[in-house]
Amino acid sequence: MIRLDNLSKSYFVQGYERVVADNLNVTIPSNVSVGLLGRNGAGKSTLLSMIGGTTAPTSGRVITDGTISWPVGFSGSFNGELSGAQNVRFIARVYGVDSDELVDFTADFAEIGRQYYEPVRTYSSGMKSRLAFGLSMGVPFDTYLVDEVTGAGDARFREKSLQFFTDRMQKSGALFVSHGMEAIRRFCTAGAVLEAGKLTYFDNIDEAIAFHHANMQVKESYDD
């Protein structure tokens, strides 16, 4: 379970206040995959960061009775001077999982060969993505945060990543951000729509998508 308790977040941009979350009070059930929908710039990634604990809210809090992942596939926190294996071993110690098992799992999953033992700064962006996704799948969480990432590499590797993530969802929940409705429908049974700082939760993903599309049509009519 994840509960947003009077959660608010705002920024000041060029002297104007931009409200991302306006006193949100929403409970997301355990073991449910939720598609987080909203127009570009609505603040979906910021909301994920607050739930994941990497961005502080302006006020309010996030309450959970389970473990929450970092954004799946996020490679921005790797230490470039350390090898992939060394980065993985460090993460294993932080999260209290068996370091040897996680190092072996990630090496097998990422399929980057000898580069796994070379500094991450020498990796291509694709190799970093493979490493990050394999690491994300190697640590079991109650809820996974996914921000437009479901794997990298060739078609075979992407399909392997998608299938593994699908299997993970049999025992875990997720908060899933994607602009692709096909991916949202594939992974999510419920939905939440962020619009103008308000979050509306739906038990049915199709109802959430319909509400999001209605919001977008209203916005487009204003733009006209």
Image (cartoon, rainbow, N blue to C red):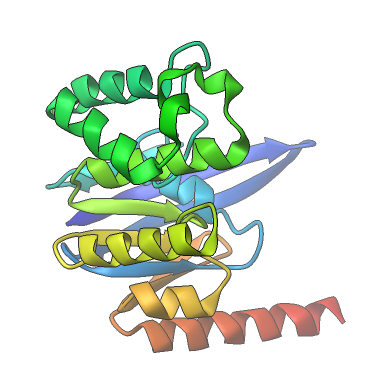
Q: Name above or below for residue 142 compared with residue 169.
A: above
Which residue extends farthest right?
224
Q: Quadrant of the C terminus?
A: bottom right
The furthest residue to the top: 81
Q: Residue drawn at (60%, 59%), measured in percent from left and top?
A: 42
- Residue 221 vs residue 97, the one in the foreground: 97
In the rendered image, residue 131, in percent from the top left (x then y), is placed at 42, 37
Q: Say whether residue 70 is left or right of residue 152.
A: left
Position of residue 33 measured from the top left corner of the image (x, y, whole percent): 29, 68
Which residue is at a point 17% across and 64% down the rendered structure image?
31
Decide if residue 61 is in sight here: no
How many badges with numbers are in the image?
0
Tell which of 109 and 66 is nearer to you.
Answer: 109
The quadrant the N terminus occupies is: bottom left
In this image, 56 relative to 86: left or right?
right
Q: Residue at x 50, y 16 (%)?
A: 119
Quadrant housing residue 89: top left
Query: Is 66 situated above or below 161?
Result: above
Q: Is residue 46 placed above or below 82 in the rendered structure?
A: below
Q: Is residue 207 visible?
A: yes
Query: Quarter of the image holding residue 11?
Result: top right
Q: Which image quadrant for residue 29?
A: bottom left
